[in-house]
Image (tube, helix red, strand yellow):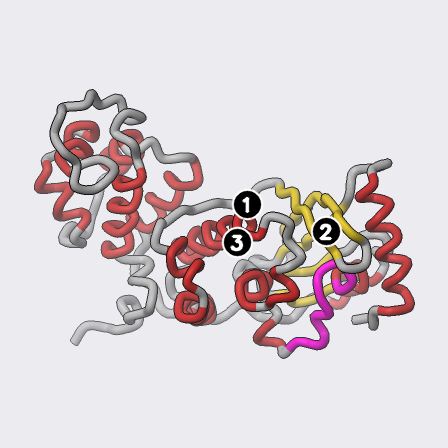
């Protein structure tokens, strides 16, 4: 009897096995303009956009049958040179290449336990002694594990939410007030989906992550559509523009720092450019929060 741990059905596919590899290859092939791949127009009518399978096979120097077997999940082992050739042929960006190798090379493993939600007392103390900087501690799923008064004032009163709803990506899609904070919600939401897809490739056996993706897939049509595109994105420097009901428009840099003593956790801080209107607005918001927002 085959184990169901690794191949359990979900609303969004089978991460960590060849079906996810095949879906990713199909999605990237469909998204690539043949002209960007250096292919001339052969005059044939294209029934669907993107590269044909035979064109991908030609560019990657593999057989068409091999591409078919990869996309259908009938090839379980792919060599590194072939992956490199496919990545080059599909013009994959750095994050996309990393994701391709991750889903192709992931090995069977027992189900992982969810990340421990505990935050070191000294880390909570650090948050509480940062009155001028909104900050929080997240895990890889973007669950909010701890926060300070400034983060609550800038984003939402996390303490008023049930613990299983304190997740930044979940709030971005399912909480109308949180969603209204973004000046460009669609851009930020798409970044959330790409980040979540990258993490799902790294931790295919994370049950809590699977549940989060399943809930968002069922409840939000935008998430469902963008998840199917297989866009991926790794950590990088971020800038967010919020339209805050108290402070107005703020442009903030999102600084992310790994917590060495607790792998999988990161300290996230929000800062504004010195001397800017955003810094002034953020300072006003933090002064207001001293009286209006309850402490953690």
Q: Nearer the viewer, mark 3 or mark 1?
A: 3
Residue 193 magenta-highlighted:
no
**Residue designated by label 1:** 235
Quick check: 289 left or right of 263? Answer: right
**Does residue 147 appear anywhere in the picture?**
yes
**Does residue 112 appear anywhere in the picture?**
no
Quick check: 234 left or right of 19? Answer: right
**Residue designated by label 2:** 269
Residue 160 magenta-highlighted:
yes
Q: Are marks 3 and 2 in contact (CB under 8 Å)?
A: no
Quick check: 42 left or right of 153? Answer: left
Q: Quadrant of residue 294?
A: bottom right
User: Extreme bottom residue here?
Assistant: 162
Q: Earlier in the sequence, mark 1 or mark 2?
A: 1
Segment tinted magenta in the rendering = 152-161
Q: Which mark is residue 197?
A: none
Q: Which mark is residue 189?
A: 3
Callout 2 secondary element: strand
């Amino acid at each position: 009897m085959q184990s169901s741990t690794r191949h359990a059905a979900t609303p969004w596919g089978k991460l960590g096995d060849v079906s996810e590899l095949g879906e990713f290859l199909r999605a990237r092939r469909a998204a690539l303009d043949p002209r960007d791949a250096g292919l001339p127009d052969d005059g044939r009518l294209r029934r669907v956009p993107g590269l044909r399978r035979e064109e991908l096979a030609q560019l990657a120097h593999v057989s068409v049958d091999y591409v078919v077997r990869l996309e259908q999940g009938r090839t379980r082992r792919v060599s590194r040179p072939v992956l490199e050739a496919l990545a080059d042929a599909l013009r994959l960006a750095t994050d996309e290449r990393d994701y391709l190798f991750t889903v192709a090379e992931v090995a069977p493993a027992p189900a992982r336990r969810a990340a421990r939600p505990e935050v070191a007392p000294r880390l909570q103390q650090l948050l509480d002694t940062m009155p001028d900087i909104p900050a929080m501690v997240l895990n890889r799923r973007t669950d909010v594990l701890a926060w300070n008064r400034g983060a609550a004032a800038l984003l939402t009163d996390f303490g008023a939410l049930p613990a299983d709803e304190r997740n930044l990506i979940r709030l971005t899609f399912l909480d109308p007030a949180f969603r209204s904070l973004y000046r460009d919600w669609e851009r930020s939401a798409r970044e959330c989906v790409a980040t979540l897809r990258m993490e799902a490739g790294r931790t295919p056996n994370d049950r809590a992550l699977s549940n989060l993706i399943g809930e968002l897939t069922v409840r939000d049509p935008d998430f469902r559509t963008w998840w199917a595109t297989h866009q991926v994105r790794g950590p990088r420097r971020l800038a967010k523009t919020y339209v805050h009901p108290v402070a107005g428009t703020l442009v903030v840099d999102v600084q992310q720092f790994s917590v060495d003593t607790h792998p999988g956790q990161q300290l996230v801080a929000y800062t504004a450019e010195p001397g800017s209107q955003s810094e002034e607005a953020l300072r006003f918001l933090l002064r207001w929060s001293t009286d209006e927002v309850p402490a953690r």
